[in-house]
Amino acid sequence: MTLNSITLAKLPWRKLFWGGTIMSLLSPPIAWGFIQRSTQNLVYTNPQEIASQRVAIVFGASVWSDGTPSPMLADRLDGAIDLYHSGQVRKILMTGDNGSAEYNEVVTMQDYALAHGVPEADITLDYAGFSTYESCYRARAIFGVKTAILVTQNFHIARAVYTCQHLGLKAIGLGTPDWERYSDATMRPAVFREMLACVKALLELHILRPKPTFLGKFEGIR
């Protein structure tokens, strides 16, 4: 028996299976299509079709230098705020990047929601949601979320749902408008980056399983 065969024999069969599968999915469009198909029954564009959940999770995006949300982030927030005011969720977990004192997505998100009538008591902030993977991981491990409605753009929602599902969080997704709202010049690079991110997601979820940048003590959502 060769050294390589001994090494392979010691690997868990699930990693061997997913390793072979992901090798066949390393083309970004194929990885993207696989994740789209895997979540197609869990993603909605009409909030009225979504069953109520206790928590909505909103994923961060760029904020402007004046502390206001970018249009894409505002659309995500509007989606979650509408779910809250319609009674479909009772709490909102806002997860994003606060990697430096000068840049804070989640405080901007909170300020926007407060200005649109969501009480502070019903908002929870995750300052260390540096990626979709880390946001989903921390939502389950730190904030104790077991089921949720995820809110983000249509081009991103499938990967968000797929990631949460494979990290032990039963999720459904509300996709907010993208191609119909933004120019092709904005959407084409966004979708290309998303296809690359789908390859990374498959590797993280099925092979690497990295820990988030920060964990910490359990906080829960009141």
Image: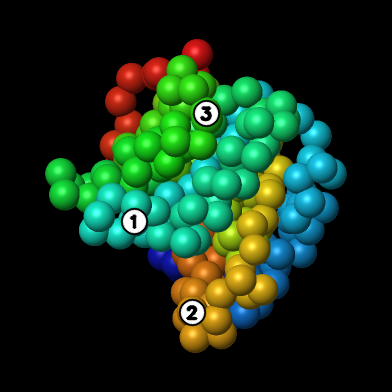
Picture coordinates of residue 137, whole percent (x, y): 47, 39
Image point (55%, 81%), residue name: 183
Q: Which residue is mark 2?
A: 186
For label 3, the SS is loop
- Label 2 or label 3, whichever lies nearer to me, is 3
Q: Quadrant of residue 33?
A: bottom right
Report the residue at 39% width, 19% height from top: 218
The amino acid sitting under disc 1 is Val
* First in residue order: circle 2 vs circle 1: 1
Which amino acid is tagged 3? Val
Regarding mark 2 in the picture, which secondary structure is present there? helix
Q: Residue at x 15, y 44 (%)?
A: 101
Front residue of this view, candidates 171 and 153: 153
**Residue named by callout 1:** 63
Separation of residues labelled 2 and 3 (CA atoms): 30 Å
Viewer-closest of 76 and 137: 76
Colour approach in the figure = rainbow
Instruction: Look at the image and tell me whether residue 105 can be seen.
Output: yes
Q: Where is mark 3, residue-wise?
A: 118
Instruction: Confirm or deny contact between disc 2 and disc 1 (CB under 8 A).
Output: no
Q: CA distance from mark 2 to mark 1?
A: 16 Å
Closer to the camera in the image, 182 or 146: 182
Which amino acid is tagged 2?
Answer: Thr
The residue shown at (71%, 64%) is: 36
Label 2 crowd bin: few (<14), some (14–19), many (20+), radius 10 Å: few
Instruction: Using the image, determine if residue 125 lies above or below residue 44.
Output: above
Q: Is residue 144 left or right of residue 55?
A: left
Image coordinates of residue 180 in percent, x first then y, are 66, 73
Residue 98: image tag = none
